Amino acid sequence: MIRNYFKIAFRNLLKYKGYTFINVFGLAIGITCASLILLWIEDEVNFDQSIPDKELVFAVPTNQEYDGDIRTFFQATPGPLAEVLKTEIPEIRKSARKRDLNLLLSVGENSVSSSGSYADKDLFDIFSLQFISGTKTEAFKNQKSIVITEKTASILFNNSNEAIGKNIQLDKSESYVVTGVIKDFPKNTSFQFSWLIPFKNFTDGKEWTKGYGSNFTDTFVKLKAGADVEKVNEKVKAVLPAKTGDKDTEAILFSAKDWHLRSTFENGEIVGGRIDYVRLFSFIALIILLIACINFMNLATARSEKRASEVGMRKALGSGKKQLIFQFMTEAVLTAFFSGILSIIFLIILIPQFNALIGKDLSLGLTNPIHILPIFAITLICGLLSGVYPAFYLSSFKPIEVLKGSRKQTGNASFTRKSLVVMQFSVSIVFIICTILVYQQVQHVKNRSLGLNKENLIEIPAANGTIIQNFNAIENELKSEGLIENAGLYNSHILSAGNNTSGVQWQGKPEDQDILISYRTTTPNFFETTGMKIKEGIGFSSSQAADSTKVLVSESFAKLMNTDNVIGKKISWNESVYTISGVVNNYLYGDMYGSSDPVMFFHQAEGADYMYLKPTAGGSISEKLTAIEAVFKKENAGFPFTYRFVDEAFNESFKNEQLVEDLSQIFAVLAIIISCLGLFGLSAYMAEQRRKEIGVRKVLGSSVLGIMKLLSKDYIKLVLLAIVISIPIAWYVMNSWLQGYAYRIEINWMVFAIAGILAICIAVITVSFQAVKAAVANPIQSLRTE
Amino acid sequence: MITITDLEKYYATEEVRTIALNKLSFKVKEGEFVAVMGPSGCGKSTLLNILGLLDDPDGGSFVFNGIEVAGFNERKRADLRKHNIGFVFQSFNLIDELTVFENVELPLIYTGVKPAERKVRVDAVLEKMQIMHRRKHFPQQLSGGQQQRVAVARAVVNNPKLILADEPTGNLDSSNGNEVMDLLTELNEAGTTIIMVTHSEHDAKYSHRIIRMLDGQKVTENVLAEFKSV
């Protein structure tokens, strides 16, 4: 029996090639889409899976309250916290501090610039680092020890086995002995480092790291198995207020399970993160599959006339309804199966492009049951889903009616079909609207006035080597060679937050005001370099010593002081008093969608992290960079020259939004293609069904245009209905998406109009292929076939 | 074998109710060959559908082989049908996607016959209908007469007690038509009961008895040949 079904199914698929193509191709697109998304989700969900006992591993960020607003900071715990947590809370088995930095590692002539951390030795256990050579107990016995990853070892030494016991020079100064080589981390791990050195190397000689006054390090802990996380978290929260007397700052536990997917905090609580995108894209994959299945259902029922006599005859010969349902389901599943195979081919072709788009390294891995089974399952479910309605519909035909040819298309089926088309187009239109709005929002933020000129602004890491000492020489040389107009040092990446304090006082500051202010150290020409303006007063002089009690403040800071003229006013911080000599315009940093904290600027070159250069106008930028590199090679000998453009860094900060934009574009296009395929097939069958009517009309004198109108009219109505349905949905979805951004666009009704017109145009073009074909056909031909 | 009494069937559209069968009664004995004639719309086809258990009457009684079948549900009708009744249609109604062999095999599949036996029986009936050489062809590759021979082969492969033929020669030229009528006569002589709806006086002459209908009622009955009960 099954063989008979397969035979019929095969022959049917072969016989109606166009129909088969639409079904198989449409469904294959859907399955491909869903598979890509599943691969992406698998990667997201598997993040940090490589950490053993990850349910026991926690990072310790701090929640800090400023004027009723709780903010969550990472790398912001005081020095003693790690040790205190371990000794005071029995459930905490291990604790370690970790502070990241980028250093130049050299072995002889061989150098590599890589990121690593100062760390306590418990970190080995917390992250379960696997030592290839050396042991975790011995590794940090001596202060000048360094543990490196296998990859770093293979770069610095010919053979990673030779590394142990050898010296590595850090930033061309002190030497450290390699006491351990650890296995590399998998790519999808949240915290990556190429090397570790004992934390003591950072704290030595820094008294401020010994107390609770500065939050400067990450802290990680590992709990004892079976510990009640909620209870431990309560204990952790109590530690800092007890030590400092400040109730506004508390440390919290942040589970390794949440590091990647749930890392957005609001008011001290996790509110989401990438998990939102995982959910969003899963939903979209489902929708795309659904509209692909709709094609199948629609075409199968629309061309039921062709199958009707078969159904009738089978029934007359004694087939029961169940057997027919089973037969049609078999056919649908077989079609889906072909789609599945086609989609695997698509996947092989598309995965590299998809990887490039989302910046991941996904692979199809068909031998992996976790990959092949879901594809199989999706295929099967699609087959069953798209087969079920046609199967019930076709098998319910009354044999006498179809065998005598007296059966008319029932109103029910055509209503269902129309509803499904409306559904497909509604989805497509929602996608179109969302795509436009996401694009508008991203552009809106990208075009936001930052208060500085990011175009062509070059950023060079300045913390390593002799850049800061030689800053004046570098600046002068670059200027005299005509390469740059200005240069400046800065203790932060210009667009990033961090380096802030709530300890600034001034006369008239309300007692209860607790506000976070960023502090920046810089050099005099920084403002001209970056295009920031001194709005009032004057900037820094050329002498750092002469400026030691001067401070510049941002406009928002000046406003905070609530006085007519802030120039000459005094502020105090860290037991020093500074005089305000100028006011700088507000500029945007940190959250690109929000507003930035007030800033105070000090004249100080030391401690700078970045150097900014404004190249001279005209000429080739790459030639200039080569010349700039030569100067840096001379003034910062032995260190590699790296740079990036601030506008590129700026664009990169929209990675998530860009991903949503790119993917929503792709999904919109795919949804439209699948819907159009369906509409194309449907209109072909409708035109065929009305051949006789069209023939009669033409004989009676109807024009080609008249026939086209006749055939298109019905579909236009459906699309109009889809527009009406989709607009409120799209508005609701996008309005709630935009609520997440403080700086956002207003939704303009024009977007809906454009999407609607686009949908109508697409539908008209699709349908008119068939309409034209039917309208220009010779009427005699169509009448004779009856 | 068949006794119908006061059989009624209506077709209702939104505005009009058409009476297709109006208290129709007659009997058909086992082994008889009966022709049903009448103008278009007299209810012949409706009658055939009810006799073939494809449709359910709205009133009256239909006793098939001693069982009252009026009011049977679809599943019960299908079960009775596949074991007892073969159909031959004017438009052949072969399944285009199946070969001659597969078309004829279909009823055996539905009655659950084993593959090996199916092959033997299908080959035998194809031999008998003289279309063995066409067994691997698809219906479109055959002439009308050949297609109807396949349809007859399919109707008889299950050895039904009753064959219902709906204008079996309607789409055929006279020589092909005669061939099909000869086939039906042979089957009847071998013991199969046949009820045939036809417009053709010529075809009707092959039968034992002609029932003439008008407006859903029997008007006359002509006995053409002496029929002895088997």
Image (spheres, coloured by chain):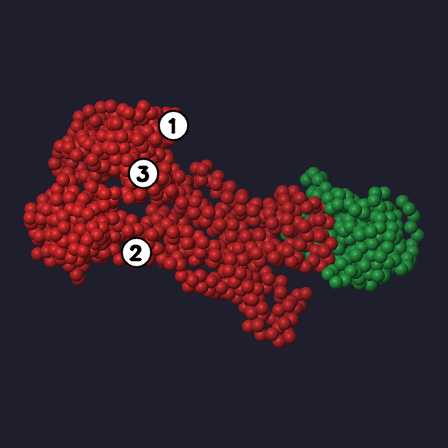
Q: Which-is-in-front pick, marks 3 and 1?
A: 1
Residue A569: % across, % down: 14, 50
Q: Residues within 10 Å of mark 3 (few under 14, many from 20)?
A: few
User: With respect to residue B192, does A60 lie above or below?
Assistant: above
Residue nearest the viewer, comparing B169 with A192: A192
Q: Give the quadrant of residue A365.
A: top left
Chain letter, colour red in render: A
Query: Which residue position holds label 2?
Result: A446
Q: Residues within 10 Å of mark 2 (few under 14, many from 20)?
A: some
Please, which chain is the residue tagged with disc 2 on?
A
Chain assignment, label 1: A
Which label sits in the foreground, 3 or 2?
Answer: 2
Determine the CA span between mark 2 and mark 1. 45 Å
**Residue type at numbered disc 3:** Ser
Q: Percent position (x, y) of residue A693?
A: 64, 68
Please report whichever mark, 3 or 2, sits nearer to the chain's N-terminal start: 3
Q: As displayed, is residue A64 above or below residue A328?
A: above
| In this picture, residue A332 sits left or right of residue A225 | right
- The residue carrying mark 1 is A228
**First in residue order: circle 3 vs circle 1:** 3
Using the image, determine if residue A178 lies above or below residue B164. above
Q: Nearer the viewer, residue A329 or A37?
A: A37
Q: Earlier in the sequence, mark 2 or mark 1?
A: 1
Which residue is identified by label 3?
A190
Chain B hue? green
Which residue is at a point 51% across and 41% down the rendered structure image? A377
- Disc 3/disc 2 C-alpha distance (Å): 27 Å
State the residue at coordinates (75%, 43%).
Answer: B76
